[in-house]
Image (cartoon, rainbow, N blue to C red):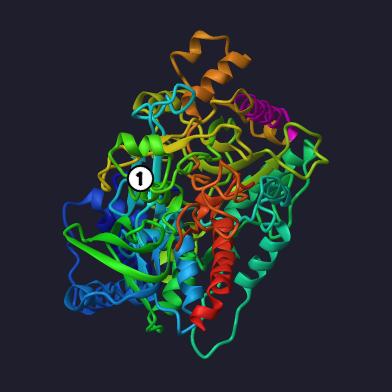
Amino acid sequence: MILSAGFSQCRLFILATVLVALAVLAFIGGTTLASVSNANSATTASRAGCATSEMGSAEGLISSLFATINSAKCELTRADQWPADFADQVLKNGLDEYDFIIVGAGTAGSVVASRLTENPRIKVLLLEAGADPPIESEIFTLSSRLHGSIYAWTDYAEPNPNCCQGMRRGRCYWPRGKMIGGSGSMSGNIFLLGNQQDFDRWQQLGCEEWSWDEMQFFYEKASMNESSAQPVGELVLNYFESLKEHNELAQLIFNASRELGLPYISDLAKGTRVGYTKAIPANIARGRRMSVAKTYLGQVANYRQNLNVIKNALVTKILFSADKSQAIGVEFLLSGRHRLSALVRSEVLIAAGAINSPQLLLLSGIGPREHLTELGIPPLADLPVGYNLQDHGMLPLLLSFEREIETSPGLSDPQSISDYFLHQTGPLAAGVSIMGFINTNASNSSSYPDLHLVSHTIIPPGEAYSLQFLQLRDEIVAGIMREASNRSLLQIYGSLLRPQSRGRVLLRSADPQAPPRIYNNYASERADQLTLLSYVRFVQRMCATTAFRHFGLKLLHVPIEECDLLAYDSDAYWLCYVKFLYIGAWHPVGTCRMGADANRHTVVDQRLRVGGVNGLRVVDASIMPAITSGNTNGPTTIIAEKAATMIEEDWNQELA
């Protein structure tokens, strides 16, 4: 369900324009778009040029259609849906002092900025290293095109012998959003809160104030559509559009899971649990991404004089008072050339994500003393910044169809393009993922899953882009295509919901523009390897169901030279497969761990205040003591909601 790699953005719009023109001409002539497209191809093949004369009416129609498409494109990319850039005013007039400075306009930063500035007495500066998202972010089915672009941080982890050996560099790929909305502007939009027992674990780890009831309370607050004279930020959630062509695949998955005793989950709003579903809450509306950067930040920023947003502003250092006890501002690089500083009256709030937040703290002297000293950075607070890195990871399995199944038109299909640009419907607006949650270490009666399965798109015969998107080595992709032998493939991704392995983020140097060193340590713990092995065996049990056997579905052998030296389907074979194809799910958390004040493993307390200094908090997924059971953008939104309330409570008298 991804456009072929050769399609550029320019070609997409040209093709869309031509196809819509064909659609209207087809309508006038009483034919379908597909028949016009086919007829046009046949005619082109049969004659060298167009011999038909015209009187000008058709040319007028074409001109009108160009205007229509351009108008539709402009609606998708309206500048006023994002906050205005305050950079020019700063260069001209300088910066005022602010009550709060927020670093990062991703999910958490957008929510906190929106909530704090509901109080007109609170003046906030929001600094974002990137610019506004491009149109590929709006069309969420194209968001994979943002990887490797100027809209993303594109890093690679340090070599790990336990994972990612089948990736192009033999290293795990770590993309993150670098734009308004951060990774929430390029993710799959899925909004899951996790499981109640996730937050029971948080409480056991010293976070008594972060219960499931608290998360539910702030989820309801976020979902509340408040009436106000001025716009108020809000959470926009809907289900993905489901096309009739997806029904056969969905029914296949549900029939197989039912044979294995798994129930259908009708509602995930109350948390993830064992079962299968296609009712997946997502930040979407009529085929368009509704990131909180748009619905919280963009919706209010241009109405509030107390909120200033500066784009293309890379924060390089936190500034401290003379005695190093109090954060007083930040230093940042604007558009790569202007080095500026901003001062704060109350607090600096770091919301740069689970990789960039610890990087900034370390650059500013907050972190393990030994590591900072090695790099010549004077240590201010000796804290375990960068430790406790967690990610769900994902292990792709491919199943081949012997009997073909109904599929929707591809994203590059003429009808798909015209449907989206004219109506925001069709395959470009639809989601096809079917989610399963299973428990491999207990009976199915347990509601606490340890594996997340996503039965994803069907790869048409000969289509390799989605495999290339995973950054797999060319020879592995070529081997998969040979083994597929022109059959369609079903992709299933398995992710560990409670991985035991822990990684770490360190500085590469004291240069703030140098990429960090990421040690993800995926599958370094034997328990994680065995849970992934259980995932493979579960999919094999699905292949043995009547539903899967009806389509002849079976696991595709992926040629990997080292693994093929082992007996196929042995435990040793699949553990080798894990070593090569267990890759990142891009859900990093935990590197500025929250916990009890006296805990030597924590960076922030339960009110997200950084230990050892004043006037500094971290507000993003990095504060999670343990990863949640599902995609992490949802919990990050709720963390930010709760953080905004706590900040207001703590500064109530000073800001009244």
Write the residue at 60% across / 78% down.
Answer: 225
Residue 516: where, in percent of width, then height? Answer: 34, 40
Residue 389 rendering spot, x and y as whole percentages = 50, 40
* Drawn side of residue 362 relative to residue 621, left or right: left
In the rendered structure, which segment of residues is drawn in magenta?
A: 529-546
Residue at the image position 28 percent from the left and 60 percent from the top: 331
Q: Is residue 165 magenta?
A: no
Foreground pick, 274 / 21: 274
The answer to whether 278 appears left or right of 399 in the picture is right
The residue carrying pointer 1 sits among few (fewer than 14), some (14 to 19) or many (20 or more) residues within 10 Å by Cα, namely some
Position of residue 518 relative to residue 288, above or below, is: above
Task: Specify whether 447 is left or right of 619.
Answer: right
Number of numbered discs on residues: 1
Q: Is residue 541 magenta?
A: yes
Q: Residue furthest front?
A: 323
- Main secondary structure along the magenta-highlighted residues: helix
Q: Nearer the viewer, residue 44 or 76?
A: 76
Residue bearing mark 1: 4
